[in-house]
Image (cartoon, helix red, strand yellow):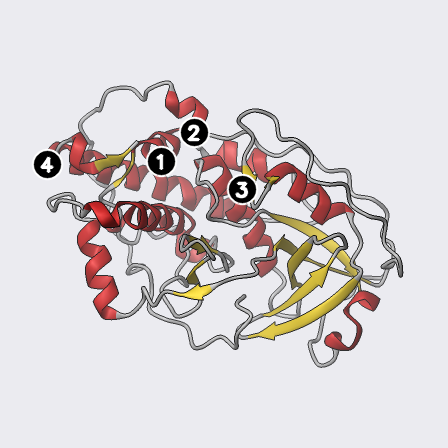
Amino acid sequence: MNRRTLAGLGGLLATLAGCSSPPPPPVLPPPSPRAVQAVDPPPPAIVHASPQAPDPEPPQAPAAAPAAAGARMFRGRSEDEWLRLMSERPVVRTLERFHSTLFVFHMDLGDGVHISFQPERPGQETFWRREVTSYHLARLLGIQNRVPPTVGKRVPLSAFGRFASGVGLVVDRHGMVLGSASVWMPVLNRVNMHLLPARREWSGWMNPAHDLPEASRERARQVSEVLVFDYLAANYDRWNCCNITADENGDLVFRDNDAGWFPDVINRLGDPNVVRRVPRYLYESVQRVTPELLRESVSHDPMAGSVHLVSSRAYAGYELRRQALLANLRRMVERHGEAAVFSWP
């Protein structure tokens, strides 16, 4: 969530109406070897330590370890190191609480490691689980530096302090609150891409019949990535004031990714035509990231052994959307050519 008071939710990403299966598409050439590289391996399994209360004087976390060649990086650390630190380190203190549809807590884990924690609440037991699943999808697709690393975490109720008042947290018999921990984003600037003038502009960028303005190529690539990401997860809550923001470098941040994976929504195809122009790496990744691969990656989350993160029906809906998206992109290639549709490497 944003550090500001969030405004109301915006419009839907795409009409979530069912449609018939697309006709058999023409076959494109097989993916290049880059496709293998674009699909990142799942994170290593994290062995969750026994619950513990926050330490008054926390041990100092080591400096960011040197990343292996080709490792996914996020804000100066490898994503695997972020996942380990967020999962293992106890909460030192809770700094802030934000509320819109959900409650989110800004928590300090010591040595500059800060998280955004979305807790389990009555009626909202599954929201944090969908955040975890969405991160794994972004990672497998090879989307870099847009989705903050996210992991399931248990936090003792005592760590919330006064910020727990009036929230109605779900507390287990060990005094722990389950939820998702994401890397804290210190800067989230509104870019107002949900407003009509901006929507008209970026919708034009997504049309392969139009040339891409050179000055807008990078922003257009990021828009294409979020459209693919949200269509596959059936995330309907993106285009509003606060769920599409930019970091201090002006790059888009894809966060608040908990509005996808609803079985009754994801099993409707919606409109795959919202995605008409993509980076080639992303097209190749979508071909490779099957429901089985996604399920296996999600199983590495430390909470996967104790809670059901995503339903089998949601994985089935993901596969329906994946096939519909690929078929639509093949139709775009047949109509406009590969160079126009795959406008980025």
First in sequence, mark 1 or 3: give its number. 3
Q: Nearer the viewer, residue 333 or 1?
A: 1
From this view, report whether residue 141 is shown above or below residue 191.
above
Q: Cβ–Cβ below 8 Å for labels 1 and 2?
A: yes
First in sequence, mark 1 or 4: give its number. 1
Question: Does any portion of residue 111 appear in the rendered image?
Answer: yes
Check the picture and name the quadrant holding the C terminus.
top left
Q: Quadrant of residue 203?
A: bottom left
Residue depth check, mark 1 versus mark 4: number of the one nearer the observer: 1
Residue depth check, mark 3 versus mark 2: number of the one nearer the observer: 2
Q: Under tag 1, what secondary structure? A: helix
Name the residue rendered at 48%, 42% in the picture: 137
Task: Give the Cα distance between marks 1 and 4.
Answer: 19 Å
Residue pointed to by mark 3: 136
Instruction: Decide if residue 242 is on the left or right side of residue 306.
Output: left
Q: Under tag 4, what secondary structure? A: helix
Q: Under tag 2, what secondary structure? A: helix
Instruction: Decide if residue 188 is on the left or right side of residue 127.
Output: left
Q: Callout 2, which amino acid?
A: Ala
Residue pointed to by mark 2: 38
* Outermost bottom residue: 166
First in sequence, mark 1 or 2: give its number. 2
Task: Give the Cα distance between marks 1 and 3.
Answer: 15 Å
Residue pointed to by mark 1: 282
Name the residue rendered at 45%, 36% in the picture: 142
